[in-house]
Image (cartoon, helix red, strand yellow):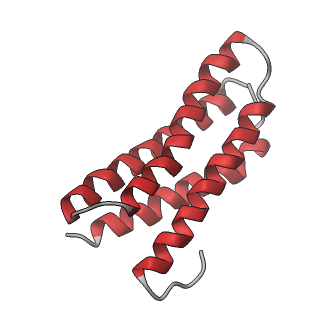
C-alpha cells in the first residue's frame, strides 16, 4: 500500500482497494465451474467478499469511535470469511490454488491492515 499522510488518504486508498477486491472476486466467481457445488460455495464467497467493500464504505461513514470499531470489526470478519471460502474453493478442487493466490494474499493483507487500524483505537 502507498505511503499515506492523513486518515483521509488512508480511507480513500482503502475504499479503492476494497472495491478492487470486490471486482477481482467477481471475476474469480465467474471462473468457477458451472455445477451445484460451485454455485453454492461461490455465492457464499461472493457474498462475503462483496461485503468487505460495502462494509468498509460504512466504516468511512462512522459517526463515532464506537461505531467505527463495530463496523471495522464486521469488515475484518467478512475478509476472514472470504479467506475461508477461498480455502474451500482450493481444497475442494473447484479451482487450482494458483488462480487463488493473489486474491488470498490481498484478503490477508486487508485483514492485517484493518486489524492494525482497529487496534489503534485501544
Position of residue 98 in the picture relative to residue 84 (left or right): right
Q: How many labels, in total?
A: 0
Quadrant for residue 105, please give it.
bottom right
Quadrant for residue 34, please give it.
top right
Position of residue 1 in the picture relative to residue 122 (left or right): right
Residue under the image location 25 percent in, 62 percent down: 63
> Foreground: 69 or 60?
60
Residue 26 is at least partly visible in this image: yes
Q: Is residue 63 above or below residue 76?
A: below
Residue 83: x %, y % from top left: 54, 42
> Foreground: 43 or 9?
9
Residue under the image location 61 percent in, 37 percent down: 86
Q: Is residue 3 above or below residue 1?
A: below
Residue 83 is at least partly visible in this image: no
Residue 94: x %, y % from top left: 74, 25
Which of the image's four quarters has the N terminus? bottom right
Residue 15: x %, y % from top left: 53, 63
Direction top: furthest residue = 36
Position of residue 67 in the picture relative to residue 16 (left or right): left
Which of the image's four quarters has the C terminus? bottom left
Residue 116: x %, y % from top left: 37, 68
Residue under the image location 21 percent in, 63 percent down: 64
Amino acid at each position: 500500500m502507498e505511503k499515506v499522510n492523513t486518515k483521509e488518504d488512508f480511507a480513500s486508498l482503502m475504499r479503492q482497494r476494497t472495491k478492487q477486491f470486490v471486482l477481482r472476486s467477481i471475476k474469480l466467481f465467474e471462473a468457477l465451474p458451472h455445477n451445484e457445488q460451485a454455485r453454492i460455495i461461490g455465492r457464499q464467497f461472493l457474498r462475503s467478499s462483496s461485503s468487505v467493500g460495502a462494509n468498509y464504505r460504512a466504516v468511512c461513514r462512522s459517526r463515532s469511535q464506537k461505531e467505527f470499531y463495530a463496523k471495522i470489526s464486521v469488515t475484518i470478519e467478512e475478509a476472514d470469511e472470504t479467506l475461508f471460502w477461498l480455502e474451500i474453493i482450493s481444497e475442494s478442487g473447484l479451482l487450482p490454488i494458483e488462480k487463488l493466490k493473489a486474491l488470498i494474499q490481498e484478503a490477508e493483507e486487508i485483514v492485517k491492515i484493518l486489524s492494525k487500524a482497529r487496534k489503534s483505537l485501544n
